[in-house]
Amino acid sequence: MSRTIVITGAASGIGAATVVRLQAAGHRVIGVDLRGTDIAADLGSEEGRAAMVAAVEKMAPEGIDGIVAGAGISNGELPRETIAINYFGAVATLEGLRPLLQKSRQPRAVAICSTAAMLPFDTEVVDLCSAGDEASALSAVADRPQTAYATSKNALARWVRRAAVSPEWGGQGILLNGIGPGVVTTPMTAPLFAQPEMIELMRQSNPIAVEGYAGPDEIAELIDFLLNMQNHYLTGQIIFIDGGSDAILRPTQV
């Protein structure tokens, strides 16, 4: 059965691999990114988020079956943009398109979080994100760029856990889950592999039990499952797909 899926961050990396996989299975995909796909939108701004929602509503007035909130950046020199896109853009995508999801008989949503959610993060900024205070969160993180990415992903993972079991999501039969990829070979991570010091840092922060890091198509396989699974019971989970990093770093976590 063909389903209609919206994917943000669709022009490259995990998003692009997911587009390819879903289209090959016969699904209709509406891609969102800054450029190079169906809808051009900057999810770091309120105007861009509103424009994205309006464009999806126009393209799929009958509703959608799934959402992948995958747009994100990892740039230590852009802490404000990191929080704006990775957290507030993702939440605005999921909440803004939720009414369209409610029209589906099998609605599913996936947020791309990260193993970075396990790294040191800024508690104040996470709390401001959770309170929906974007202006204060961006102001606070501006002076703390070193933890911006981990903070954005930690805040998003917490939001997924809370929202998934709310009356608006789980109560409406919409299954919302997050995934936590470890190191994945994508255009976003390619510059890191050119720096020996970053390779060593990744080895320390994301130790793995298997040989080699994942390609984006491997992450797309998990996203495909979460979007198209038949059960009505799997929700509110952050599923780490990380080569074992979570088990290595947090062996007593259950």
Image: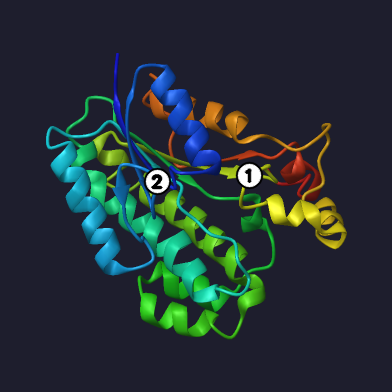
**Residue hosting label 2:** 36
Residue 151 drawn at (x, y percent): 57, 66
Which quadrant: the C terminus? top right
Q: Quadrant of residue 102?
A: top left
Q: Amino acid at mark 2?
A: Gly
Name the residue at 42% across, 24% down.
22
Q: Is residue 185 something that shows in the picture?
A: yes
- Along the line of sight, which residue is nearer the eye, 33 or 168? 33
Q: Nearer the viewer, mark 2 or mark 1?
A: 2
- Figure check: 174 above or below 85: above
Secondary structure beneath dot 2 equals loop
- Along the line of sight, which residue is nearer the eye, 37 or 100? 37
Q: Amino acid at mark 1?
A: Thr
User: How far is the residue under mark 2 from the one under mark 1?
Assistant: 16 Å
Colour convention of the picture? rainbow
**Residue hosting label 1:** 186
Secondary structure beneath dot 1 equals loop
Closer to the N terminus: mark 2 or mark 1?
2
Residue 179 drawn at (x, y percent): 54, 41
